[in-house]
Each structure stands twice: as C-alpha cells, then as structure tokens.
Amino acid sequence: MKPFKWIWKYIRKYLFRFIAGLTICLIVSCLSLVNPYISGRLIGAVQGGTWRGVLPRYIFLLIGVTLFRSVLRYCMLLIFDSTSQRLILCLRQDIYAWVHRQNYGFFDANRVGDIMARMTGDLDAVRHFTAGVIYMIFENAVIFIAAIVMMFTVSWQLALMMLAVAPVILYCAARQSQRVKPAFFNIREHFSRLNSVCEENIGGNRVVKAFAKEDYEIQKFEEVNQGFYEAQIKASDIWRKYLPALDFCAGLLNVFLLLGGGVLVITGKLELWRMVTVNGYLWAVNNPLRMCGWLLNDTQNFFASVDKIAAMLNKRIYIFSPDNPVRTARLQGGVEFRDVCFSYDRNNPQALVLKHISFSAPPGGTIGIVGATGSGKTTLVNLIGRYYDVTSGEVLADGVNVKDYELNDLRACIAYAAQDVFLFSDTVEGNLAYGAPESPLEELIEAAVAADADEFIHNLENGYDTIVGERGVGLSGGQKQRLSLARALAVNPSILILDDTTSAVDMETEHEIQQALKRYKNRTTFIIAHRISSVKPADQILVMDNGEIIERGTHNELVAMKGYYYSLFINQYGEYAKELVG
C-alpha cells in the first residue's frame, strides 16, 4: 500500500470531490438494480392477471429511474474526470518543480528519458486510475454485493448457485494480481529506455547524420523497441492465462441459472417472476466478475507507475539553502578556496577529482585556469555556485562560506557562460534576457556589443527578434558562444565564469572580446581556456593537472618557471614564443 499512501497526499486535496463522486456512484449503482426488480414484478403481475392496473406505474418508474440514473452518471463522470485532471496538474507541477530543485549530481545519474517517462506515461497511468478505475472498482463492488443481497431476498437457492464460482474467481484474481505487478514494472522500465533512446538520437540527429550512422541507430532503436514489445507480450501472457478463466466462470452463471432455476420453476418450487428477477440481476454479478481481471491490471499498472514516480521524488536533494541563510543582493566578488577536496561519488569520497585546492581571488580580479582535459577545471568553478558541494574544505564568497548563503541569492550573483552552449527556442532578445528578464533592450545590446555579437545579430533576418531554432540550430558555434557570453554579461553579475567561451571564435574576435571585457571592472572573472591568449591578461593563472594546482602566477611568472605552462606556451606560439621569452 506504499504507492497509495504516497499518492494520498494529492488525493486528499480533492477528497471532497472524490467523496461526492463516489456518493453519486453509490446512488447510480443502487438505481441500476431497480429496473430488474420492477421488470420481475411486472412479469408477476402479468402472471397474476393484475398487469393492467400496475403497468402505467411500472413503465413510468422504469423510464424515470433510467433518466435519473443517466443524469447522475453523467455528473459523476464529469466530477471524476475534472478531479483527475486537477490532481495530475498539481502532481506534474510538483514533479517539474522538484526536478528544478535537484542538483547537477541528479542529472548526472539519471537519464532524461527516465524523467520524461515519469512525467508522461506514468502520470497518464495515474490519471487513468483516478479518472476511471477508482469509481469502476467501487461501482462494480457495490453492484455485485447489492445484486447478491437482492438475489437472496428473491431466491436464496439461486443466490447460492451464483456464489458457487466465487472461490475459483478469487483464486484466479489473486494469482493474476501477484504476477502482473512485476510485469508492469518491467514495462515501465523498458518504456523509460525507449524514451531515452528517442530523446538522445533525436537531439543528436546532426551527429548521427555526420557519421552516416542512421542504420546503426535504427538497429539500436529496434533492439530497445523489441525489448518493450517483449515486456508487453509477457504481461499479455499473464492476462491470456487468467482473463479467459474469469470470463468462463462468469459465463457459467448463465448455465447455473438456466439449469438450476429451470428445474426449480418446473418442479413448482420457484415462481417464474423470481427467476426472471434473478436473471435481470445476472449482469450485475456477471459484469464485475468479467471486469475483475481488467481492473486488477489497471490497478497494478497504477501502483507500478506511482512506485516509479515516488522512487524518483524520494531521492534526496543534497544542495539547498540553510535554515537561517545569509541574504545578499550583490556580492563584492571575492572568492577563496581553502583546502578544497571534491569527489563526485558520495559513496566513495576517497575518489577525489579535486585535491587540496587553495587560492584566493580578490573582488574585481581575473583568474585564468588552464590544464589538460579532465584536470578538474570546470569542476572547480562549479563549486563556486554550489552546483556541487565540496567533499571537504571550504569555498568562501566575500569571506562567507557559500553553504551559508541563500542559494538563489548566491547564484543570482554568478553568471556562467559555458563552451557547450544551450539556447532556447526563443528570439535572440529572449535568450539574451533569460537571466535578466527586466533588462531594457539597450542593456542587452550593450552586452551583445561587449560579446562582439551585435553585428551578426543585426545581420539576421529579424535582428534581435529573430527566432533562434532549438539549441541554436542555424547559428555557428562561434555565434552561439558569443550569444552565451552576452547572456551572461546582461545579468551584470558579481562573478563571471567563462568556461572556454571563445574556443569557437577566431583570434581577432577573441581579442576584441577581451578588450571589451576590460571595461567591466566591477566583477570577478574566472576564465577557463586552452588558449594561452585567453588567460594571458589574467591577474593570476592556475595550472591544473589531475585535480591539483601544479603551478600558479601571472603569465610572465609562469613562463619563467619553464614548467607545464611554458611548454603549453611554446606549443601554441612556436619559435615566436621563444623569441618573446628571450
């Protein structure tokens, strides 16, 4: 019952509506048993020769009850459907908000397809259950019990005959329920994999085409799709085994009624009208028995989906604001690392990616970071905005541990321009104003000029109103990087992080960007780069290797050391570098 206990907190928000719907369902279910009884009494009146006096009244009752029941059922369906939509609206909003509260580590460990499966297929299963299955279970249970009670009032002998198949049905239902739940879990898992493959390959379609790997990806999709198909077939095999048995047992009721009831009527032990009345109630026993298997399937599908959603939402959020946070509208920009160690694996904190990092950056200073791929450069700057938390040591901003700040305040003071640029399917202006939506166009243009993006933006079809395709399709790598830089500058941050932001632009454009950035004196800048030209003007350059700072100093100081930085400088500038060094 854990899934239902978890979903209960959402159901109870609309408990009154569910109770109202089930109350109407109870009335509708009871009314559905009135017409068979009236029909039986009418047959009795015909047999007794008194039908002329009661026929108009009985016909009026039959029509009136049918109309009244239809109206009530319509209202009931509206209540359940609208309530389920409201519940799913609330649940989907909570899931989406929870996903946004998660830290980078969650997205490192979870596939996008899994998250999408939770928000689509699994939520649809929850909506289907709350919109229909709940009232159908209640309705069928009420009708079945009420029909049996009515049968006993009409003929206890026939009622006992109808209950003869109950043990077999209960056994089949229990076995089916036991076996079908793991099958639905398997289906949900394969559905997640299918979603992941689709999302990955549609998002990476340009890479697929560039390497002519269409056939390979189609084959990979066929394998995953085949797995989903086989999971569905396994579940269908369970239904194929038990549903016919349930249907057969339900069909036996007709045989029992005709044989047993016929014998009782012929021998004079039962009046015909009683047999007709019981026959009218037969559907009320038959239908719930036939629906039993399908309702069990839908219920187990619901439980499997809720389990998947709850398992995702029960994952701990590790990075959040403290109870009494330090609030700030703007940082001065001073950053200090004190003996910082970091591991991505919380279960293995000894697998360090950063090892004993210590340095300080004064407000308004520029820190350059260079090093081989995988040396920990990007990981280091991610600790400033608490996208990850340190394993040991401290990261300070303006002398305060970043863990003590209100998280949104801290991140609002930091702007990040990454090498891997993500642009939204919006206008150029909309993308530039993403971090500062209240900024006037003039300030956005100023940021674009500083990023050397204004000229190419004006050359676009609609200038700043040009719609950027998904992920910036149609723009060059350099253009996307310059838009990303302009978006970061538009925030007017206290701390600006440039992660290889100019790797896709030419040297002349990079020089112009550097000159423009020099005009911004009120922010601390971290520049991660492979080009010496990008970090050369920095106040301090950190050289990283295998998660450690192996060299530090200004450009001239590092060249004089003739270590890693010097070899990098010589490799990029060749003989000209040797002449510069002298």
Image (cartoon, helix red, strand yellow):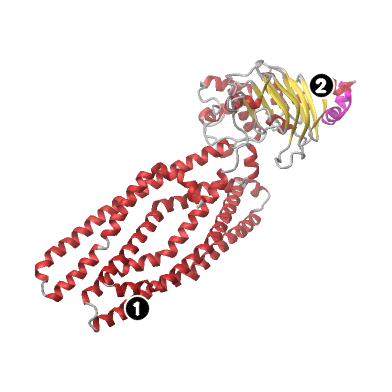
Horizontal side, residue 85 vs residue 407: left or right? left
Measured from the top left, where is residue 410 in percent x and y? 61, 25
Amino acid at dot 2? Gly
Dividing the picture into quadrants, the one containing residue 249 is bottom left
Left or right for 293, reference 533: left
**Quarter of the rendering occupied by the C terminus:** top right
The residue located at (35%, 44%) in the rendering is 16
The residue that appears at 46% across and 61% down in the rendered structure is 296
Q: Nearer the viewer, residue 189 or 143?
A: 143
Tell me which segment is drawn in magenta. 561-580
Are the residues flagged by discs 1 and 2 in contact, CB closer than 8 Å? no
**Residue 549 in which image quadrant:** top right
On residue 553, the disc is 2
Circle 1: is it few (<14), some (14-19), or many (20+) Cα within 10 Å? few
* Residue 403 is a magenta residue: no
In the orientation shown, which residue stands out farthest toward the left? 53
Mark 1 residue element: helix
Residue 298 point in image, percent of width and height: 46, 58
Amino acid type at circle 1 is: Val
Prevailing SS of the magenta stretch: helix
What's the mark number on residue 327? none
Residue at numbered disc 1: 255
Question: From this viewpoint, is residue 421 visible?
Answer: yes
Which tag is nearer the camera, tag 1 or tag 2?
A: 1
Q: Where's residue 391, x and y in %? A: 72, 34
Comparing 333 with 470, the one in front is 333
Q: Position of residue 286 (x, y in %)?
A: 35, 69
